[in-house]
Structures are given as structure tokens and as C-alpha cells.
Image (tube, rainbow, N blue to C red):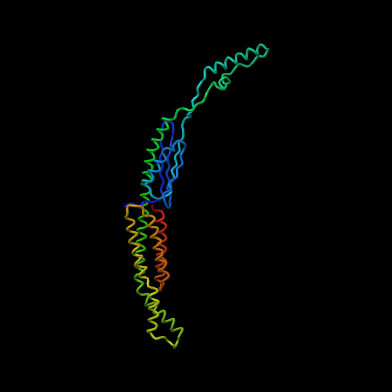
């Protein structure tokens, strides 16, 4: 069964008429599913469809969707008001005639000046309603494709993470077996250590062997790590079960990593031998790496 990562990136672009658009989707780790959009004005009506599509395929992660649209041509048109132009020409001719009567020779009238008279030329935006609807339709199609690409990328990365965690769990299982093999000898070590310490302290007034055995048995009981070993094996089995489930398991894997760490800490605190202490520290090192990988899984 696939395991999904929470990190991924996918993009696509296209052109509708004279509009070039692009869609980028980026996902990173998150406690839940947090979706954020950035898009130009006019796409508000299809955000709900985007959000619904994401929620259908993603369960955890911080998701950012960025959509850009650029025009390759100006959308303005210019309308010539012939009546206003005629009035401007008439006014210019009349003004020229009056100036000439006064003995003033004006410069020839320039067309640019007449066209610049307010009302002669009017700028207006072209009707974009039909084009905008086609852009929305094309972006929706592109969004479906880029979302599918993102899911595939998260699945591929998740598969790699699952294999890494599986290998790490195998290491934990092997170290647990080593701890189990060393656990039985802990009692003998404690007895010999206690006898040596008491001999040094008491010299000739040695305690009876029965008393030493009783004290050693009490210490051995406190240092018994078989319960921690059993729980470590149980967590190994639970982790393998999770990695084979077809649903988001990241939170539970993070919880199991915490439980692994708890048992490793207890094992170290109970350790009666250098060998068990070394195994406990190795366990903590591997468990930390499991925790790091689990934090990336959906």
C-alpha cells in the first residue's frame, strides 16, 4: 500500500487566446491540511472547486496554490468621435481666421493636437467576458492535471520514506534482540559487582552469601529490561503494520517514534552493563532518525 509524503511541487502553464497562465502547487509539512491561494482578480468563483479537489486527495500538509495570468496584447480599444473631431476642426479653422484678421500668422494645425482634444478619441476596454470564461475553464483543466502530478510526486517520495523507515525499524529490531541476549547476564554481573563492593567495604566482616544474593536479586529486579524489550518488539510490529495501510499514518508513526524513544530511555536508565547502555544509545540514535522521517509522512 502506498505511503505519501507531505512535501511536493508541481506546475503547469498554458495559453488561452492572448492570455498566458501558470499554476504552481507547493506542499510542505503541516499538522493538518492548510490550503492557501494566490491568484489574480476574477478567479474567485472557482476557488471553491480548487479547494474541494485538493481536499479529495490530500489529508495533511501546508498547501500553497499560486496562479498567474499575463496578457500578451493590450485589451484597450480607441473609438473616434467624428462629430467631436469635426467640431474641433471647425474651431481650429475659425481661430486661425480670427488670428489672421489680427495680423497674426498661426502655425499650421497638427492632427495630433486635434486628436488630443477631449472627447475626440475615447479609450475603452474590450469585452472580456467570453474570454475570461474560457480562461477559467482552461485553468480548471490545468489544475486537475497539476494536482495529479503533485499526488504522484508525493506518492513516490512517500514510498522512499517508507523504505527508509522500514530499514530503520529492522535496525531497531536487531538492537532489541541484542539487548534481549544481554539481559539474562545482567543478574550475574550485578551479583559479582555487589559482592566485590561489599568485600571492599566490609573487609573481614563479610555478609552471608544469602544476604548478598538477596540484595543482588533486588537490584536485578530493578534492572530487569525484559518488559521494555517486549514493548520495543510490539512497537516494531505496529510500525510495520502502519506502513502497509492505505491511509494517512504520519501522526501515528510520530506517536510510535515517541514510544520507541520512551522505551530506549528506560532501557538506558535500567542498564546494569556497558553492553546494554551502548545498545540503548544506539537505539536512541536510530529512533531519532525514524522520528525525522515520520514527520514528513502524510
Q: Tally the marks.
A: 0
- Residue 289 lies, in percent from the top left, at 41, 59
Q: Is residue 214 above or below residue 236?
A: below
- Residue 68 lies, in percent from the top left, at 45, 38
Q: Is residue 151 above or below residue 257?
A: above
Say whether residue 91 is left or right of residue 229: right
Q: Residue at the location (36% across, 63% down)?
A: 172
- Residue 298 lies, in percent from the top left, at 38, 52
- Residue 61 lies, in percent from the top left, at 41, 50
Q: Quadrant of residue 67?
A: top left
Say whether residue 202 is left or right of residue 162: right
Q: Quadrant of residue 149?
A: top left
Residue farthest along the top direction in this orientation? 101
Q: Residue at the location (37% across, 71% down)?
A: 225
Residue farthest along the right direction in this orientation? 103
Q: Residue at the location (34% across, 71% down)?
A: 181
Residue farthest along the bottom direction in this orientation? 204
Q: Residue at the location (42% across, 80% down)?
A: 194
Amino acid at each position: 500500500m502506498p505511503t505519501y509524503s507531505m512535501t511536493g511541487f508541481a506546475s503547469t502553464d498554458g495559453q488561452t487566446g492572448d492570455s498566458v497562465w501558470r499554476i504552481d502547487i507547493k506542499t510542505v509539512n503541516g499538522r493538518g491540511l492548510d490550503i492557501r491561494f494566490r491568484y489574480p482578480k476574477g478567479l474567485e468563483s472557482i476557488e471553491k472547486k480548487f479547494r474541494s479537489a485538493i481536499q479529495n486527495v490530500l489529508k495533511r500538509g501546508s498547501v500553497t496554490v499560486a496562479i498567474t495570468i499575463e496578457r500578451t496584447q493590450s485589451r484597450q480599444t480607441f473609438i473616434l468621435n467624428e462629430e467631436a473631431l469635426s467640431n474641433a476642426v471647425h474651431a481650429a479653422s475659425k481661430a486661425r481666421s480670427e488670428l489672421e484678421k489680427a495680423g497674426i500668422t498661426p502655425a499650421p494645425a497638427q492632427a495630433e493636437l486635434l486628436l488630443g482634444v477631449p472627447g475626440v478619441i475615447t479609450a475603452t476596454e474590450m469585452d472580456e467576458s467570453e474570454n475570461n470564461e474560457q480562461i477559467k475553464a482552461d485553468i480548471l483543466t490545468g489544475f486537475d492535471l497539476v494536482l495529479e502530478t503533485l499526488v504522484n510526486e508525493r506518492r513516490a517520495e512517500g514510498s522512499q520514506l517508507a523504505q527508509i523507515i522500514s530499514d530503520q525499524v529492522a535496525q531497531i529490531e536487531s538492537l532489541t534482540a541484542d539487548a534481549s541476549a544481554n539481559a539474562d547476564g545482567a543478574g550475574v554481573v550485578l551479583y559479582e559487582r555487589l559482592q566485590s563492593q561489599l568485600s571492599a567495604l566490609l573487609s573481614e566482616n563479610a555478609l552471608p552469601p544469602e544476604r548478598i544474593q538477596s540484595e543482588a536479586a533486588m537490584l536485578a529486579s530493578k534492572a530487569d529490561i525484559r518488559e521494555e524489550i517486549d514493548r520495543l518488539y510490539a512497537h516494531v510490529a505496529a510500525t510495520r503494520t502502519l506502513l502497509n495501510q492505505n491511509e494517512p499514518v504520519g501522526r501515528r508513526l510520530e506517536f510510535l517514534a515517541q514510544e520507541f524513544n520512551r522505551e530506549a530511555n528506560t532501557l538506558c536508565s535500567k542498564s546494569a552493563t556497558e553492553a546494554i547502555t551502548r545498545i540503548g544509545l544506539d537505539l536512541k540514535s536510530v529512533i531519532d532518525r525514524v522520528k525525522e522521517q515520520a514527520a514528513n509522512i502524510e
